[in-house]
Amino acid sequence: MRIPNIVLILVLSICSGLSKVHAQEYRIFIHPTSNVTVYGSTNINTFKFVYTEEIAMNRPVRVVQSEGVLRLSGGIINLKIRAFDSGNGMMNKDFRSMLKEEDDPFINVELKALKPDWKNEAWREGKADIIIKMNQVEKTYTVNCKVQNPGSLLIYGRQRVQLIDFGLTPPVRMMGMVKVSEWVDLDFSLRFATDR
């Protein structure tokens, strides 16, 4: 299946409405090669949790261009906490408990804005604003994005997140001998395409 070029479509929309705010809706798909991994550590070793399900975006995304920035609404990815797997059943259980899966079973990642580095009315690289929501707490981060051939937009990076910022408490095991760090790294590579 050929993936349409979301960036070309967005740039054409922008060029046709540079003097005014221009809005369009797109059905955006996430390519199956996309991935998310959570890395962390204890005072003894390191660990990682790989997202094992297909990553999807299930609603249309509205795109509005204003002053060279593409603002998006509806660009939400719901990552199931249960779909993160370390390969160790006990660690998976601790991870789900730490993230309070019973109260909120998802980590939400929302794509809010693309900030291209414009060159000759086109762009290859830029920044993206994303909102990460865990445990009903939202935090905004700025990450890298770039246009990749053939015709896909890649949002990628490794974002360091402090668990206590989300009201989460890292577990302690073996009467305090094993302590999980309050910092984790979200490593992600999300490739997007559209139906137009």
Image (cartoon, rainbow, N blue to C red):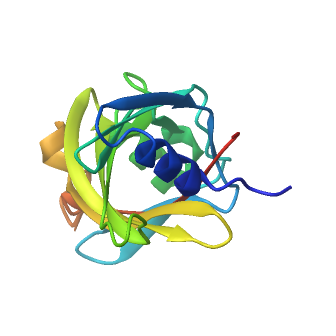
- What residue do we see at 42% from left, 24% from top? 102
Left or right of 73 on screen, residue 93: right
In the rendered image, the quadrant that contains the C terminus is top right
Task: Answer above or below: position of 74 versus 141.
Answer: above
Task: Answer above or below: position of 98 versus 50.
Answer: above
Q: Please tell me in which quadrant of the rendered image residue 97 appears.
A: top left
Q: Please tell me in which quadrant of the rendered image residue 108 appears.
A: top left
- Residue 91: horizontal and vertical position, in percent? 46, 55
Q: Which one is in front, 164 or 19?
A: 19
Left or right of 34 on screen, residue 48: left
- What residue do we see at 45% from left, 35% from top? 75
- What residue do we see at 18% from left, 57% from top? 182
Asked if residue 189 shows in the view, the reply is: no
- What residue do we see at 21% from left, 31% from top? 137
Q: Please tell me in which quadrant of the rendered image residue 29 appears.
A: top right
In the rendered image, the quadrant that contains the N terminus is bottom right
Asked if residue 69 shows in the view, the reply is: yes
Q: Which one is in front, 107 or 86?
A: 107
Q: Which one is in front, 14 or 77?
A: 14
Task: Answer above or below: position of 37 versus 101.
Answer: below
- Residue 41: horizontal and vertical position, in percent? 30, 70
Identity of the residue furthest to the top in this view: 103
Total marks shown come to: 0
Identity of the residue furthest to the left in this view: 165
